[in-house]
Image: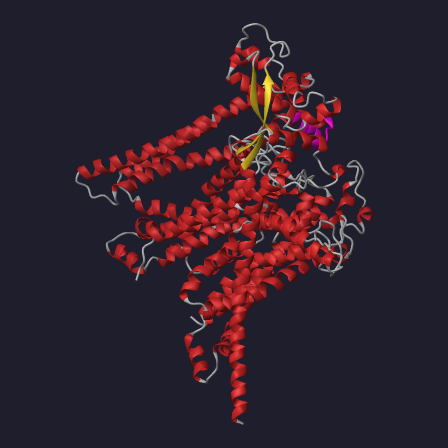
Amino acid sequence: MNKNKEQLLNKRYKAEQRFRLYGQSAIFMALLFLTIFIFKIFSTGYSAFQKTWLIVPVTFDAEIMMLEQNPSNEDLQDADYYDIALKSMANLDPNANEDQENELKRMVSYFFEKEIKNELLNEPNLIGKTKEVYLTASDDLDQVFKGNYPRDLPEDQRRVSDYQLKIFDQLVANGKVESKFNISFFTNADSREAELAGIASSFMGSIFSILVCLMIAFPVAVLAAIYLEEFAPKNKFTDFIEVNINNLAAVPSIVFGLLGLGVLLAIFQLPRSTPLVGGITLSLMTLPTIIIAARASLKAVPPSIREAALAMGASRMQTTMHHTVPLSMPGTLSGTIIGLAQALGETAPLILIGMVAFVNTIPGSPMDPAASLPVQIYIWAESAERGFVEKVSACIMVLLGFLITMNLFAQIIRHKFEKKWS
Amino acid sequence: MNLILFTFIVLLGFTSYYFGRRKAYTIQSSNKRLTALPQFYGYYLSIWCAIPAFIIFSLWAIFEPTIVKLLILSDYSNQGYLDDELNLIYEKTKALSRGQFTGEITPFIEASAEKYFSLRSIAQSSKVVIVLSAIIASVAYAYKRISSNSRTREPVEKFLNAVLFTASLAAILTTVGIVFSLIFQTIDFFKVIPLFDFVFGTHWYPAKAFVRDSSEALDPTMYSDTFGAVPIFAGTFFIAFIAMCVAIPIGLMSGIYLAEYASTKVRQYAKPLIEILAGIPTVVYGFFAALTVGPFLKELGTSMGLEVSAESALAAGGVMGIMIIPFISSLSDDVITSVPQSLRDGSYAMGATKSETIKRVVFPAALPGIVGSILLGVSRAIGETMIVVMASGLAANLTLNPLESTSTITAQIVVILIGDQAFGDPKTQAAFALGMSLFLVTLCLNIVALRVVKKYREKYE
């Protein structure tokens, strides 16, 4: 009898421990996913911040470039650089046949002509001389150099030929291959060539959409929150508004994309693919988030503040505008930043309003076609080239960096400026 | 021109504030008692100055193009042109008058271009005149009211109140906009495709609708067996189900652990860390699912002798589950912490262990709130787009095998609407019909969930 009781008790204690273990392992699993996730992104992405350059001696032969004596700056602009560019690549292997010369050319980006031109424009007295010029390696060699490309595949499954690899290895052995910080990733617009593609256009697109979103959503949401919290009579209509807000906060983002497509593009005829339309769509999406945050922080202002102001003879509008709203601002602002961070990461609605178009110029205003950072991630992730995989991860790192900064900023505002009432 | 006028109105608005306030001071100096603080006189005057002008200005901007178009096209009205042709003529006219036209110039179009140009200049100058006279009239009226020292605070506050009220309508307007943008296309869609075929058809193959000559009349029989949404609905719920299989146990158990067991220190760090999962953009999850989880599952399956698609429902659903964990864990954490301590104390007093208390007392008490949080999670899973677009298949297979690929409502909307869309095409309309069903389903889930959570909160407050 007694033993039985003890057994039962032991069983119950064991169950207790097991339950506790389930809880711990659930937390562990969630954190494990997070770690794998971050690790995976960083391990594939960090290499995109480096770019591989081939150092190739280029002879600036005035005859081949069809330049006359003492050329002016304009002559230099118009000169023919393609032939000297080709020649300097072909010179890497003096006994290459025509096919091999072609392969040699494909070892660098198609941009190489321009790189050589810039070199000469910076230093016009190079004419007739030979200089070692840094040329962007093709994205496949870039990947080979970073060790991301399996070299042991059979040749016909590789995008790099054995011949190219041989020459490349020679260059590496001679120290003519160098890896430097990839500035062009931050300054270039999108490109079909992985080695040249950068995030500048999508970054500007994101900034413009977020600004448009902020300019629309913030004032409207704050005014709406003030009305609902401070002035609205309690009736069916305000209840209806409230239900609407709560529901909008949970409507899938893609539905807002359909709204943008069906109303902003089809009816108001706003320009497609632009951050303006993207920003308006995102602002409709962030509106409920900001309203809810602003209302919560208005609610947190103690009634004694309002009563004191009213007792001094302020009108209700004055009480609200001079006392309640300024006191609620820290909470409202941090809610706004969190809402904007959500909008910054949003992809689906932007795809529907056409912000997936291939844009290879950097937008100068919200009316120019652009992509945004998350959409750029999507575009690159869908393309088959190996060179884009690390670009995607790097772009994700930039995006996550922004989101983390914004959220930290929101935290700081909240902790620093919010008054604790107690 | 518009910009100059706009800035002018704004500047006038600001200056009239100072005028109004100065007027108030002069009234004060003549030993009369003011009816409000001096700045209200300023607000009153600047509101009267700017608002009527803005209203006229924006109405004009909205209606001017339409009226000009009507006037131009009235020349062509009895020549039997189609609507599209008329639009083309109008566009040509506009381009010509701006000097950007490069095609063949007919005398007709040249004449209308001249007319367009003169109409536009008349419109511009009359706009400036009308706006300016409106400003003068309303400022004069307001100035007279100020001078006679009548009330200014009440009208200003009434105006502000109206502005606040209008802003609060934004939420309703957005909902109306959503319904409006979805419903017309959906109705058009169901005019071609019978509702029955959409809801009960088992073949979804919208690419078939793409091969159509636009000059042909719509032939409904062509689309039979093209827009049967059953595979899509099934795929959506199936992937959501997989997601919830991952999210509910992990989310719920971590919620319980955080609320009941975790020390303040663990809670302080673990909770925000888990919530990071909710802040990661979904496109990032999609990339992760497509690049890492999909191939990993495929390899794992092949090593066990199973045939796994690289775009399996399991990969998409699993990653989606990870995304939903924080929603469920923090909501259920909140719900569990708000269960009154007295219930727990009563249970402990009867000799129950902590886990027994949780399982038999706290959990049943918190159940409605937990169900609400799960429903919100389901609604997220159904509406999630990027993970499915990137990691699950795009072909709509009717299958219950998690290792095969399926498609969802959201993925199909993106597939149909990516790139250029032709409005009026059944394929485009199908996307809106899918959007409508998505909106309705999530709306129901949200309303039920919000109501359940609210009821529950009221119970213990």
Q: Depth check: give the residue in front, B395 or A278.
A: B395
The answer, for residue B364, to whether it is visible in the render is no
Q: Is residue A18 above or below residue A59?
A: below
Q: Is residue B422 above or below residue B341?
A: above
| Quarter assignment of residue B267 | bottom left
Q: Which residues are magenta?
A: B79-90
Q: Depth check: give the residue in front, A32 or B399.
A: A32
Tell me the residue at 61%/48% (across/down): B287
Q: Is residue A394 magenta?
A: no
Q: Is residue B141 left or right of residue B188?
A: left
Prevailing secondary structure of the magenta residues: helix
The answer, for residue B335, to whether it is visible in the render is yes
Q: Is residue A96 above or below residue A261?
A: above
Q: Depth check: give the residue in front, B221 or A93.
A: A93
- Which residue is most to the top? A69
- Which residue is most to the bottom? A1
- Which residue is most to the front? A173
Image location of residue A239, percent across then percent down? 48, 59
Q: Which colour style is shown? A: secondary structure
Tell me the residue at 70%/34% (across/down): A160
Q: Depth check: give the residue in front, A199 or A51.
A: A51
Image quadrant holding the C terminus of chain B, namely bottom left
| Quarter assignment of residue A170 | top right
Image location of residue A375, percent across then percent down? 59, 42
- The count of marks equals 0
